[in-house]
Each structure stands twice: as C-alpha cells, then as structure tokens.
C-alpha cells in the first residue's frame, strides 16, 4: 500500500508569536532578501492574507506576488506587512567593528 502524503506548507506551523519571531529572526539573519520575502509571505498566509491585505491597504494579489520567490518587495511594503503581523524592525550593529567611535 502506498504511503499517503500531503504537501508541506510552512504557514501551517507558524501558529504562535514565539514561533513566528524565531522564524523571522532566522530569515533576517540570513541576509537573503528572497528568503526574507518568502518568510514574510509565509507568516502573512498563516495569519490570513486577506486580513494582511486589508490592514496594509495592498491587494492580496500584489502581496502574493511581492512576497514570493520571484518577488522583490519595496521597503514600504515590507514595513506595512511587518506592522500588520505585529512585528517591529529594530536596527542593531552586526559586529563590534561596525560601531561608530
């Protein structure tokens, strides 16, 4: 008998603020803009893309497009999505060597 499988969807596992925070921290620490966009898209889908679209004033279609592997969201879009999912963006120095003297 064949094993029955279902497609994996990251959004299915983003179910608590702690999990979402850890997931986004990893994405942002990667420095990979595509990974960050996709991670934001996964969180937005987990919370409901229609809800995020309403809160950001952007269409669902444009959010799906911008927050995909082929997307390249503008900073304004990223900030709106972060605000809608309840996350803030805070700058911090990457290393002690980059701090001003």
Image (cartoon, rainbow, N blue to C red):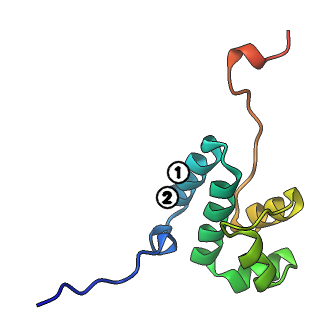
| Residue 63 sits in quarter | bottom right
Q: Residue furthest bottom?
A: 1
Mark 2 and mark 1 in contact? Answer it, CB < 8 Å: yes
For numbered disc 2, what is the local secondary structure? Answer: helix
Which residue sits at x=62%, y=56%? 35
Instruction: Count residues near mark 1 (Cα–Cα under 10 Å), then give few for <14, some for 14-19, many for 20+.
Output: few
The percent coordinates of residue 55 (x first, y second) are 81, 77
Q: Circle 2 is placed at which residue position?
A: 19
Q: Is residue 55 left or right of residue 31?
A: right
The percent coordinates of residue 80 (x first, y second) are 83, 65
Which residue sits at x=70%, y=16%? 96
* Observer-nearest of 53 and 64: 64
For numbered disc 1, what is the local secondary structure? Answer: helix
Task: Specify the label residue 4 is tagged with.
Answer: none
Q: Is residue 77 above or below residue 100?
A: below
Q: Circle 1 is placed at which residue position?
A: 22
Which residue sits at x=51%, y=56%? 18
Q: Is residue 92 above or below residue 73?
A: above
Instruction: Count residues near mark 2 (Cα–Cα under 10 Å), then give few for <14, some for 14-19, many for 20+.
Output: few
Q: Quadrant of the C terminus?
A: top right
The percent coordinates of residue 89 (x first, y second) are 75, 48
Distance of mark 2 from mark 1, alpha carbons? 5 Å
The percent coordinates of residue 58 (x first, y second) are 85, 79
Q: Is residue 63 above or below residue 37?
A: below
Q: Quadrant of the N terminus?
A: bottom left
């Amino acid at each position: 008998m064949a094993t029955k499988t279902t497609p994996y969807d990251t959004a299915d596992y983003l179910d608590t603020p702690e999990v979402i925070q850890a997931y986004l921290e990893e994405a942002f620490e990667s420095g990979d803009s595509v990974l960050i966009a996709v991670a934001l898209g996964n969180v937005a889908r987990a919370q409901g893309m229609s809800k995020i679209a309403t809160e950001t004033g952007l269409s669902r279609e444009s959010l799906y497009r911008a927050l995909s592997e082929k997307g390249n969201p503008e900073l304004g879009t990223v900030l709106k999505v972060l605000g809608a999912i309840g996350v803030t963006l805070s700058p911090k120095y990457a290393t002690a060597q980059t701090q001003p003297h």
